[in-house]
C-alpha cells in the first residue's frame, strides 16, 4: 500500500467512488488496504432560502389592485332608507333644539334683563378706560421706572392727544344720542322703540353675563367619550393577561398590527387589529370584560368580533359611545301591522350601530338558545309576529312552557296550545303528523309543476299566492322544545318528524322555529341542529351550548355568546342570514303591543277569507283523528243530494251545530268557507274538487269547490 504524502492540512486518503456501473458502494476493503475511520465533510456553500430583497415583489398596478377602496358615499347616505333615516334624525335633532330654546325664551329674556345693569356698568367702565387711554398706562409706567424721559414724554404727549380726541368723540356721541332719545319717540312707531329697547337690553345683558354662567342651557348633552387610538387599543390588549400578546409586545413595541385606520363607524369607533402570531380573536373575546376595563368603557359598549375569513388572528373591535342594551332603539317598521311578504327580508333587530338587520323566514329552519331570562321567548314571539303579518301564512304555535307568553298569537294561529300536559303533547304530535303529510303533498305538487312556473323546485311568493295549489307559508314555533324531544313516549317520533321538516320543509314553504333554554344534544337533537340554517344565540353558559346553537367550531372561531352579560337582554349573535355572524339586538315587544299587531293581522286575514283552524273557531280535526263526528255532520249537511258546494255545506253545518261551526259561517266569502272546510277534511284524506251546482239565489248553474256524498260515506266506512 502506498502511504499518502502529508500536506499542510493533514493526510489525504483516497476513498472508493461509486460508478454508474456499480450503484452500490463496496463495503469490503480491498486486500492489503488500510482501513481508516474518518468523517466526510461537505464544503459546498449553503442554499439561500430567503432571497435577497431587490425591490418590490409586485408592480404598482398589482398593489393598487389589491388595495381596498373606501366608499365615496358615506354609509348614512348609501341607500334611500339610510338617507331618509339620517334626514329624519337631523330634522328631529334641530326641531328639538328649537323647541327647547323657544319654550325657555321667557327665562332667557328675564336673565338678560337682570344682568343688563351689570352690563351697563361694565360698558361704562370700558368706555372710561378707552377715553383715558388705559391700555397705554403700563408702557408709560415702564418708561418712568427706567428713567427714559424722552420716550416717556413722547408717550405722554400721545396719551394727551388720544384723550382729547376720544373725549370729543364721546361728547359728540352723547349729544347725538340725547337728541335722538327725545326726537325718535315722536316720529317712530312704538313697536320700533320697544324693539330697540329690547335689543339694547339684550346686548347689555350679554355683556353682563359671566363666562361660566351662560344665558341659554344646552338642549342636547353630547356624550363625552375617549377617542379610540392605537395606543389605547394596545394598552387595553396588554392588560388581558394573554401571554402571546405580552411576550410579543415585550420584544417589539409594534407587535399589534392595524390593518386600517381607526375611524368612526356609526355611533362608535372601529379598529381592525392583527394579533401577534399564536393569538386568536377568541382569546380576546372571552376576556371581553377585561378588555372593557382596559378601554375604560362600559361592558355593553365593547364588542370584539373575529373575522375568520381573513385569519383567526384578525380582531374587529367596535367600541360604542353608548351601552348597546341602553341605547334607544329605532321604532320597529312592522309595528303598524301592515301586510308583508315572508319571502322577502324583514327587519328583525338592530346591530351595534343601530342599523336594522333583516332576516328571511322562508327556506330556513331556526334555533334560538339562551339561558333563562335573556329574551329567548320574546325573540320567538317577535319572529312569529313577523310571520303572522303575511296573511297567507299558517301559524302553528306551541307554548310548552305553559305561561301564556305566546298567547297574543292565538287569534291568528291555525294551531295553538300552551302547556305540556299529556293531551297537549298528543295534540302537537297529531298536528306534526298531519304537517308531515302536508309536506309530502307539497313535494308532489312542486314536482309536477311546469319548470317555467317552478324552475328551482321550491315554493315562491307567486306560487304561495295561488290558492288552488295550497302552497302558502307554514311557520311552526315551539318554545321550550326540549319538552317534546325528551318525552318518554312520543319524543322519538316527534324528533323524527321534526328532523324531516327541518331537512325537507324549507323548500316546500314550511319553516320550523325551535327555542330552548337548554341547548344540548338532548334538548335539540344533532340531526336537527345540524340542518337548521338560522341561528340566534343569546347568552349561554359555555362552549357546548354555544356550538350547539351557533354550529360546530363557532366558539373556536371567536363567535361566542358566552361573552354577553346578564344586562345584555335581547342581544345575541345571529348566524345563517348573512355572510358573517352579527351581534343583533332584538325588538322588545310586550304583550299589549303584540296584541295590537295581532288584532290588525287578524282583521286582514278575515277580510281576505284566510282565517283557519284554531283562530277560526274549529280545531276538532286535530284533537282526535279517530273522531268521525265531522264526517257525519258533513254527510247530514249534504243530505240526499249526490254532491254539494262547500260553502253551502258550511252554512248547513252552522245551522246543525252553531257552537262548533258558527265561526265558519261568519267568514266573509264563499271561497273562505270552502278553504275552511277543505282544511278540516284534509286529515281524513278527503280533498274538495270542482262540482256542478245551482245557485239558489240566481238559479244559474256553475262549477264551485264542493264534495261528493260518496267520498264522505267511504271515509266513514274506512274509519269504522
Image (spheres, rainbow, N blue to C red):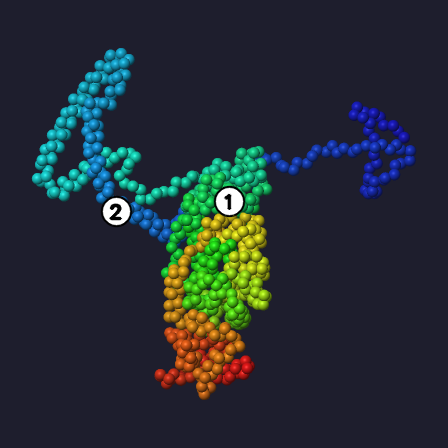
Q: Is residue 671 left or right of residue 306?
A: left
Is the Cβ of the residue at disc 1 closer than 8 Å to that at disc 2? no
Q: Name, please, the residue furthest toward the front.
A: 421
Q: Which residue is mark 2?
A: 103
Can you tell which mark lies on residue 26? none
The structure residue drawn at horizontal position 44% and vertical position 55%, both measured from the top left corner, is 586
Of 492 and 308, nearer the camera is: 492
User: Residue 387 appears at what percent x and percent y?
Assistant: 44, 63
The structure residue drawn at horizontal position 43% and vertical position 66%, both measured from the top left corner, is 410
Q: Can residue 198 be spotted in the picture?
A: yes
Q: Is residue 13 left or right of residue 604?
A: right
Few, some or many residues within 10 Å of mark 1 (<14, 14–19, 20+): many
SS category of the residue bearing label 2 = helix
Q: State the CA–CA distance, disc 1 to disc 2.
A: 44 Å
User: Residue 402 appears at what percent x and percent y?
Assistant: 48, 63
Q: Would you place residue 58 above or below residue 603 in this image?
A: above
The structure residue drawn at horizontal position 83% and vertical position 40%, both measured from the top left corner, is 25
Of 588 and 50, nearer the camera is: 588
Can you tell which mark lies on residue 288? 1
Q: Can residue 455 be spotted in the picture?
A: no
SS category of the residue bearing label 1 = helix
Q: Quadrant of residue 384?
A: bottom left
Amino acid at each position: 500500500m502506498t502511504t499518502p504524502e502529508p500536506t499542510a492540512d493533514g493526510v489525504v486518503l483516497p476513498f472508493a467512488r461509486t460508478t454508474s456501473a456499480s450503484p452500490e458502494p463496496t463495503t469490503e476493503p480491498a486486500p492489503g488496504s488500510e482501513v481508516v475511520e474518518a468523517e466526510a465533510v461537505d464544503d459546498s456553500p449553503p442554499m439561500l432560502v430567503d432571497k435577497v430583497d431587490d425591490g418590490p415583489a409586485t408592480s404598482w398596478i398589482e398593489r393598487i389592485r389589491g388595495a381596498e377602496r373606501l366608499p365615496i358615499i358615506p354609509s348614512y347616505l348609501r341607500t334611500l332608507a339610510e338617507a331618509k333615516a339620517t334626514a329624519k334624525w337631523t330634522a328631529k335633532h334641530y326641531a328639538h333644539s328649537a323647541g327647547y330654546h323657544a319654550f325657555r325664551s321667557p327665562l332667557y329674556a328675564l336673565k338678560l334683563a337682570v344682568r343688563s345693569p351689570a352690563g351697563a356698568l361694565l360698558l361704562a367702565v370700558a368706555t372710561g378706560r378707552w377715553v383715558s387711554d388705559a391700555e397705554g398706562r403700563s408702557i408709560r409706567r415702564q418708561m418712568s421706572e427706567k428713567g427714559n424721559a424722552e420716550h416717556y414724554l413722547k408717550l405722554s404727549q400721545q396719551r394727551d392727544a388720544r384723550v382729547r380726541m376720544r373725549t370729543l368723540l364721546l361728547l359728540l356721541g352723547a349729544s347725538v344720542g340725547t337728541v335722538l332719545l327725545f326726537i325718535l319717540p315722536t316720529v317712530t312707531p312704538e313697536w320700533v322703540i320697544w324693539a330697540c329697547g329690547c335689543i339694547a337690553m339684550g346686548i347689555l345683558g350679554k355683556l353682563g353675563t359671566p363666562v361660566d354662567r351662560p344665558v341659554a342651557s344646552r338642549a342636547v348633552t353630547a356624550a363625552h367619550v375617549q377617542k379610540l387610538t392605537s395606543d389605547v387599543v394596545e394598552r387595553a390588549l396588554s392588560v388581558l393577561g394573554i401571554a402571546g400578546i405580552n411576550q410579543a409586545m415585550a420584544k417589539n413595541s409594534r407587535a399589534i398590527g392595524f390593518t386600517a385606520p381607526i375611524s368612526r363607524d356609526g355611533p362608535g369607533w372601529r379598529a381592525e387589529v392583527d394579533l401577534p402570531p399564536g393569538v386568536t380573536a377568541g382569546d380576546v373575546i372571552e376576556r371581553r370584560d377585561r378588555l372593557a376595563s382596559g378601554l375604560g368603557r362600559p361592558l355593553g359598549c365593547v364588542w370584539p368580533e373575529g373575522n375568520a375569513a381573513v385569519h383567526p388572528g384578525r380582531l374587529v373591535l367596535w367600541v360604542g359611545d353608548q351601552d348597546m342594551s341602553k341605547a334607544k332603539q329605532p321604532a320597529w317598521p312592522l309595528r303598524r301591522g301592515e301586510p308583508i311578504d315572508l319571502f322577502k327580508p324583514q327587519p328583525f333587530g338592530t346591530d351595534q350601530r343601530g342599523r336594522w338587520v333583516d332576516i328571511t323566514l322562508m327556506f330556513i329552519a331556526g334555533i334560538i338558545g339562551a339561558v333563562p331570562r335573556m329574551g329567548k321567548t320574546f325573540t320567538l314571539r317577535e319572529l312569529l309576529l313577523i310571520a303572522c303579518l303575511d296573511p297567507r301564512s299558517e301559524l302553528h304555535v306551541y307554548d310548552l312552557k305553559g305561561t301564556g307568553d305566546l298567547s297574543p298569537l292565538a287569534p291568528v294561529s291555525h294551531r295553538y296550545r300552551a302547556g305540556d300536559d299529556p293531551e297537549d303533547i298528543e295534540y302537537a304530535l297529531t298536528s306534526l303528523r298531519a304537517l308531515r303529510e302536508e309536506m309530502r303533498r307539497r313535494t308532489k305538487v312542486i314536482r309536477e309543476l311546469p319548470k317555467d312556473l317552478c324552475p328551482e323546485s321550491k315554493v315562491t311568493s307567486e306560487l304561495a299566492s295561488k290558492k288552488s295549489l295550497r302552497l302558502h307559508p307554514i311557520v311552526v314555533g315551539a318554545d321550550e322544545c326540549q319538552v317534546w324531544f325528551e318525552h318518554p313516549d312520543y319524543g322519538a317520533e316527534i324528533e323524527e318528524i321534526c328532523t324531516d321538516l327541518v331537512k325537507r320543509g324549507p323548500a316546500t314553504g314550511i319553516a320550523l322555529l325551535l327555542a330552548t333554554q337548554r341547548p344540548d344534544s338532548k334538548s335539540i337533537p344533532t340531526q336537527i341542529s345540524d340542518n337548521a340554517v338560522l341561528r340566534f344565540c343569546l347568552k349561554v353558559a359555555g362552549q357546548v351550548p354555544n356550538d350547539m346553537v351557533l354550529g360546530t367550531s363557532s366558539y373556536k372561531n371567536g363567535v361566542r355568546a358566552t361573552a354577553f352579560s346578564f344586562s345584555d337582554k335581547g342581544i345575541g349573535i345571529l348566524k345563517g342570514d348573512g355572510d358573517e355572524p352579527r351581534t343583533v339586538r332584538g325588538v322588545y315587544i310586550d304583550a299589549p303591543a303584540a296584541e295590537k299587531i295581532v288584532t290588525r293581522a287578524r282583521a286582514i286575514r278575515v277580510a281576505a277569507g284566510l282565517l283557519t283552524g284554531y283562530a277560526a273557531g274549529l280545531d276538532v280535526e286535530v284533537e282526535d283523528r279517530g273522531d268521525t263526528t265531522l264526517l257525519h255532520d258533513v254527510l247530514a249537511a249534504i243530505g240526499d243530494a249526490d254532491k254539494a258546494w262547500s260553502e253551502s255545506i258550511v252554512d248547513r253545518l252552522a245551522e246543525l251545530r252553531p257552537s262548533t261551526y258558527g265561526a265558519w259561517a261568519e267568514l266573509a266569502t264563499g271561497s273562505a268557507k270552502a278553504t275552511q272546510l277543505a282544511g278540516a277534511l284534509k286529515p281524513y284524506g278527503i280533498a274538495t274538487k270542482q262540482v256542478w251546482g245551482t245557485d239558489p239565489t240566481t238559479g244559474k248553474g256553475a262549477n264551485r269547490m264542493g264534495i261528493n256524498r260518496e267520498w264522505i260515506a267511504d271515509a266513514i266506512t274506512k274509519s269504522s
